[in-house]
Image (tube, grey):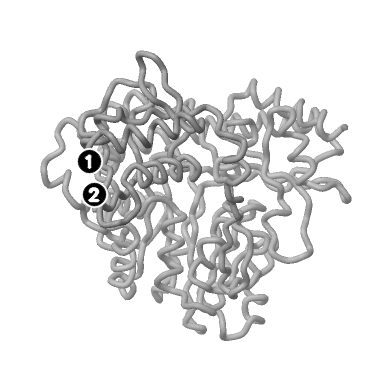
Amino acid sequence: MTTLRSARRPKVSASPDILPHLPVDRRMSTPLHQQIYAGLRGAILGGSLRAGQRVPSTRALADQLTVSRFPVLAAYEQLLHEGYLEGRVGSGTFVSASLPDDALRSRPERADPVLATPRGRATRATVPRRDEGGLRPFRVSLPALDAFPQPLWSRLVARHARALSSAQMAYGDPAGLPTLRSAIAEHLRTTRAVRCEGEHVLIVSGSQAALRLCAAVLLSPGDRVAVEEPGYLGARAALTAGGARLAPVSVDDEGISVSALEALGRRVAAVYTTPSHQYPLGVSMSASRRMALLNWAERRQAWVIEDDYDSEYRYVSRPLGALQGMDRHGRVIYLGTFSKVLFPAIRVGYLVVPPALWLSFLEAREALDLFSPTLYQLALVDFIREGHFLRHLRRMRTLYLTRRDALLDGLARHCDGLLMVRNADAGIHVSTMLPRGIDDHDVVRRMSARGLTATPLSSSYLGNERASGLLLGFGGWDDRRIAAATKALGATLDA
């Protein structure tokens, strides 16, 4: 059997003439021209060859299939006659822009993909759109990309790109660059009161990858993992990927309720929490509640997953220390990311792993995707060690305070009585409540028509009792855009 392969030399063309796998078997009784015809027609109807895509010349295809030119000519002639291909003088042969009516009628219907849930039920696949909202005002979790020192970052990346050694271009350490792990540990010890050394830091490609590792190491199918109610939807998806079951636990003004955790009994393997800036409500866990949570974890021999996603930005007091720094029994796994403090596309996050779990996490991390890309790690080491990171954080605290105040002023001016601010003490989003009876999903749909976006608060709940509100990001837009956006939001709510 001979097989069609890609042309060895790319040709100058709007649509390169590269074809999909095309089997031709001389041992079959079917004539060669019919095999070639059937293979090309099937590729067109199946979508492997698209309208307007160029196909190789008959001579080139014959050479690739190691057959004479005559069966290829016969197959092309039939496909041209039936309307599957069209010739363009001086350009070549292309897939027809419109298929024959009978071919369209015979095309098989595409079935929606079906996924098996952890409990075995089949459901239609609904992949969450992580880019929903794009760069429109009020997009949650979007930092000030307009204020990022891109020329400086570009120089650092270019410096290392030009000087990459063979070792740096090969497979990297699954744990990450030792220099970056050490720099992160030093930063966390100083600014977040995290108890760690570089040997405890594991580099991953963002907080979602960190959560998947936690699920792989800490949870088995059927285990219960407690999550905040309301809480972060992305964490729930990651933690249940291996078949764990979610147990929602209420949140009050002091953070996650430890008494509600106690009521769940001994069958809780881990708890996911955002103590410094609870997502989405924005409350901070009190000191007494933190101690109660750590004592619960020690008694139950359960794990605490601390997501410290944007704790660097706090406007009513100094940043709170991490829960992990209070842990004396090695029960806390600490998660952090550079997505909110630098830019999301950097795709660098990290975990601080208790020594007893290090080998398990390292093995799971290597199984996930071997190692993180080296180039950005190298540039990030310089960005931290040369002092650019701390200077950027200081500038961003001042900038975000200004943008938060612009948002609060705009909401007071244009949305008074229509939207109540629940918490704006920290982070780069504000949690708000809508009047009773207003559907926050409907509001978000109406906002979209005005060029705005937001996250419905109700989408953060697991149970049937859901508050209606909006999560409004303010990090990515200047004061003028925020003022205009709050005016448009007020008009939306008024309507």
Label 1 crowd bin: few (<14), some (14–19), many (20+), radius 10 Å: some
Question: Of 100 and 133, which appears nearest the observer?
Answer: 100
Q: In this view, does 171 lie above or below 161?
A: below
Question: Of 338 and 376, which appears nearest the observer?
Answer: 376
Residue 118 sits in quarter: bottom right
Task: Name the quadrant of the C terminus.
Answer: top right
Residue 476 locus on image (x, y percent): 55, 31
The answer to whether residue 292 shows anywhere in this view is no
Query: In what element is the residue under mark 1?
Result: loop
Question: Of 469 and 110, which appears nearest the observer?
Answer: 110
Which residue lies at the image location 88% right of the left edge and 50% below the top edge? Answer: 437
Viewer-nearest of labels 2 and 1? 1
The answer to whether residue 330 shows anywhere in this view is yes
Label 2 crowd bin: few (<14), some (14–19), many (20+), radius 10 Å: few
Which residue lies at the image location 61% right of the left edge and 50% below the top edge? Answer: 109
- Find out whether the residues at labels 2 and 1 contact each other: C-beta distance under 8 Å: yes
> Residue furthest toward the left?
166
Which residue lies at the image location 25% right of the left edge and 36% below the top edge? Answer: 62
Which residue lies at the image location 55% right of the left edge and 59% below the top edge? Answer: 274
- For disc 1, the marked residue is 67
Residue 91 locus on image (x, y percent): 36, 17
Real-space CA distance between mark 2 and mark 1, rounded to the nearest whole angstrom: 9 Å
Question: Which tag, 2 or 1, sits closer to the chain's start?
Answer: 2
Query: In what element is the residue under mark 2?
Result: strand
* Amino acid at pointer 1: Val
489 vs 291, left or right, is right
Residue 227 locus on image (x, y percent): 60, 67
- For disc 2, the marked residue is 2
